[in-house]
Each structure stands twice: as C-alpha cells, then as structure tokens.
Amino acid sequence: MCGIVGYVGSKNACPVLLEGLKRLEYRGYDSAGVCVVGDGQLQIRKSQGRVGVVERQVLDDQEMRPATVGIAHTRWATHGEPNEPNAHPHADDTGRIAIVHNGIIENYATLRQYLLGKGHTFRSETDTEVLAMLIGEFYNDGAGSIEQAVRAALGEVTGTYGIAVACAGEPEKLVVARKGSPIIIGVGAEEYIVASDASAILEHTVNVVYLSDNEMAVVTRDGLRTLTLDNVPVPKEVSRIEWTLDEIARGGYGHFMEKEIFEQPESVRMCLGGRLDKRDRRIQLGGLESVVRTLARTKKLIVTACGTAWHAGLVGEFLFEELAHIPTEVEYASEFRYRNPIIEDATGVIAISQSGETADTLAALREAKDKGALALGIVNVVGSTIARETDAGVYLHAGPEIGVASTKAFTCQIVVETMMALMLGRRRLMSQQAMDQYIDELERIPEKMSRVLEQSETIRQVTGEYIDRENWLFLGRGYNYPVALEGALKLKEISYIHAEGLPAAEMKHGPIALIHEGMPVVFVAPRCATYDKVVSNIEEVRARKGRIIAIATEGDEDIRRYCDHVFYIPEAPAALQPLLTVIPLQLLAFHAAVLRGCNVDKPRNLAKSVTVE
Ligand code: M6R
C-alpha cells in the first residue's frame, strides 16, 4: 500500500522523510521518492525499488540544497508500471508544485484529456500526475494560493485521496487533504510530520491530529490550520497515539491475517474503485481495453491457478458461464502444465495469482501462450512476472497481503472476475437492466461485508466449543461449493486441523461414512436455488449426530431448527454470495489457529509465494 510522509520544521527534512519512508516499508511498495523545497525550488529524487536507492541518490547528490520542508512517498503501483516516471512525488509541468497521493482518482482519464487540451504534457501513466497538473493549472490561473488551488482541483476530482502538496512559490508550507485515504499530522515542538500511517510519526511525537474525510490542513512551522474542503474551519483536538510500532504495522490487530480479514470492505472498495462507471452504468477495466473485443468473441475460457486462487477460479467458472455465457474450465496450474492441454482457437487463459510469482501458475500460463491462447492475468502484485507475461489483465488493488493464508486477495479475485464477467456479459447478451442491478449490488458489498465481520466474537466462541475436534467437513453448492473448499483449506493451513471441503450433494457418495457423533460439519447454506437441497443434506448429518454450523441468509430463522449454530450474511444475489459467505469461514479458521496457539501469519511448512514446483 502506498505511504505518505511530509515534514515542516527546522530540521533537515530529507533524513526525516527517508526515515519515515523506512517506517512505512512494511506496507509493501515498489518505488519511492522525496521532494524537498530548498532555496525556493522543488528538488525531486525518486526511483523504482527500495527507499535505500533514493537515499543513496540524495546522499550522493552535491546539488541537493538543505531544506526544512518536504514530502515523500512509497508507491504500490496501481495506475502504471512500477518505474521511475510513475513513482511519486509528481510535479506539474512548471516544476513548481509537487504532490504525493494515496488512493485512486477515478475520473483521471477525463481530466487528463482536458489538461492535454490545455497544452500540458505528461511524463507518467499515473492518475496522481493528472492531479498535480490540475492543481498547477488552477495555481497558475490565478487561484491566489496553493491552498485555494488544491481546493479548486479537488472540487473537480472523483475518487479517493490522501495527499500532501508542496509549492516552490510558498516554500514554508504543506497543504494536505483527505477523502477515503488516511492522513495524520504529528504535532512536535515547532515541527509537524504528516503521514498516512502513525508508524512514520511515532519516533518524533505521540501527539497527533487526525484528518477526517473531506478535510484539509495547511501546515507551516508556526501552526496548523484545519478546515473542510469547502473552506469551513474545523477545530481539531490533539490526540495521543497509544500503540507501539509493531501494533501499528498490524493496524492494532494481533495478526496480519486478522487485519487482512477485516480490511476486506476497504480492499473491495479499492478493487472496485474507478471501475464501476456510475454515470454510464458500465464496467471499465483499463487493463483489458486492448483485448476486450477479442475477449467478447472468445469461445472458451480456461482459468488456471493454485490453492486459494484456484478456489477463486472455481467461483469464476460460475460467473463467466452464468453472466457472460462463456464456457469455462478451471485447471490446477500444476496439472495443466504437464497435461499437453488442447487449446482451440479463440480460447482465453486467465492466470489468477495474488503474488504473480507462483511457479506452477506461471508455467501453465506459458504453456497456454505457446499454444496460442490469449493470456490474461488477475494479479495483486504489480509488475510481478505473471503480470508482465500476460497479454492483458486486471490488478486486484487489494494492497499487500502479508499473512500466508490468503484472505483479502481471494475476495478481490472474485470481484475482478465478477467485473470481467459483467463487462463481457453486457457485450454478449446481458440487458442494461441486469447490469444496473449488478452494479448496485456490487457497490453494496463492502457495507455487507462489514456486517458479517461484526460476528467475529460469536464465531470465536463457537469455534472454541469444537477446538479439540481433529476432523471437520465443509459443504456447499453452486457458487458456495468453492467457498466450502476455501473454508477447509483455511482451517487446515493455519490451525493444522484436518478438514475437507465438498459439494454438499457429494457427501452421500462416500464422505457421509465419516460423520459421527460430535463431528463439526459446516454448511454454506444461504438462500439460493439449491437451498432446499442443502437443508436435506443438513438433515442427513443431523440424523448421524454430527454438529452443524450453518452460514445462512439474514432472516432465515427456520434453519436454526436443524443447526447447532448459525452465522448470518446479508441477502445478496447468488453470484455475489461467496464474497460474504467466505468471511465467517476465514474468521473460524483464524480463531481456531489462535485458540490452538498456532503461528497464524507464518504457518509451518508454508511460504507466502511458492516460486518452486
Ligand atoms: O500467490 P498465489 O495466489 O499464486 O498463490 C497461490 C497459492 O499458493 C495460495 O493461494 C495458497 O494456497 C495460500 N496459502 C492459501 O491461503
């Protein structure tokens, strides 16, 4: 995730900024940069790679003038490759205004066109450079001050941002603003440290001011003025940070996995950001633009992946077939690569991978490409090998996933598949009315996820009742069959409990022999076309004295008659249910691992990125 640091005070700004960036490294990034205001000039140094590279540039540069004001950034690429031109800070084309930005400017393409028309030239592919240029446009057009120029520019912007802006014409000042992406201001003795995350502030001060959404601040050495984006003053209290650095890295959660589970409403928002065109009611996936017409005529899709990403692929099979009417197969990458698969004309292969480096998935992708398939990627890590080797693709924008057990990447993989299926479906057969409904439903998913997360404590208590059981079953049907597989995988990989996931109707063909008194069986049973059939399966387990935990739809009180415990998800169309039903299962696995004293974030024998066969 991108990180912001800013400094206004009497110290040499560069070392403070670079130290701050190092504190943010844990968030993951692929390029870094600083800008200091020395002698009334902006001095920008940036690079692909680590903060240390920028630090060496700064130290080796005899021309760097000492400065006491500056901004800095670590970038986790969203718009454009991780390279030097795309790294922040970005300046306007006069070189007098520089900005660092977290978030996504959704209407950047329209603004870019407007600014090109005004004669501006761009060096990068980023949405942030567009914002820098827009602020410059207002500033040079007589806005009066950098504060007013920022306000005017933000008035034209749709999307999310946390920004810090430096201006050569007003060298003692930073302007910062927030909408949807955090900005905190550390209050020291005649110095202020701006950051997107308290870990960059803590070594200077524990006293901070939090900006809320739609607020900005003008920061000078002499003081801090906070106001709304509409220019109404907002007095702010100074709060104290109570967390240690380590706690901050985990966002106050005990484990990265827990943080990532709870981040899902936000990561899904990020994933949807700029892609649901609310005005024209369509889906825009920039990374597929070059192939979308070919893809709409594709005769077959093959999804290939491993582990959790493979489960996301199984959900994709339902999505692509139901919403886009494209025949779809899902293949374990490790099998596909050695099977000499038949790739017919007009076949698209989609490799799904959080890391973008999984050896089996990469090999499967290469095999498919060699055989003439259109190679597509659904990847989280920007610039990773799979992302580079595909013909086109869509990034998750889920932010770095640190816990070995994949959680937020899974839900974002499904969100991307859903958007792809809708985009292709609309080009093939789907009515605008159906599209409208799905867009509305997708937008509601983050809020619904938050409601499911509220049940964490109940799920912990129920999990505790079964913590000594060594064998679990997870069952589901249709869209929720892959969710059952994912629930079982989560439980085994972090708590080392044996678990199996199955399509519910398969139980009677063998696994029912396992059911015995007290065995925990989890049914993913929200309201959908196969609901009654799943209830029959529940009865079969009940008859054999298994203990039943169900994931059901809010308002389904009836299901309590057959089950020992029920966790609820809000109502949602079947195609979107996996985004909700998986959350109780992630929480169940997480609590089981904690209760059994396991190393949640680094389970034994597992690596985050499996780059070997
Ligand atoms: O980075 P990838 O998504 O390609 O990784 C694939 C699997 O190795 C990964 O999903 C693995 O199964 C996780 N540990 C599951 O939590």
Image: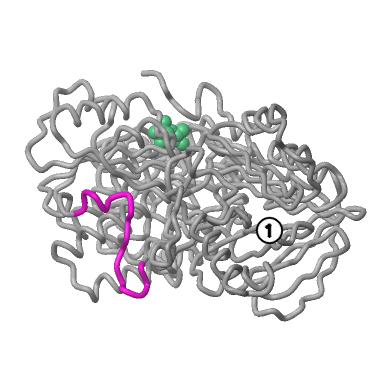
Side (left or right) of 428 relative to 252: left
Rendered view: 177 above or below 197: below
Q: Quadrant of ligand 1?
A: top left
Closer to the camera in the image, 345 or 462: 345
Side (left or right) of 273 relative to 250: left
Q: Which residues are magenta?
A: 277-292
Seen at 40% across and 34% down, the residue is 356
Question: Which part of the image, by quadrant, shows the C terminus?
Answer: top left
Rendered view: 40 above or below 365: below
Q: Is residue 471 visible?
A: no
Image coords of residue 379 (percent x, y): 38, 41
Side (left or right) of 258 relative to 125: right
Image coords of residue 444 (percent x, y): 44, 69
Dot 1 amino acid type: Cys
Rendered view: 231 above or below 426: below
Image coords of residue 3 (percent x, y): 63, 47
Closer to the camera in the image, 162 or 569: 162
Count the labels in the image: 1
Residue found farthest to the right: 189
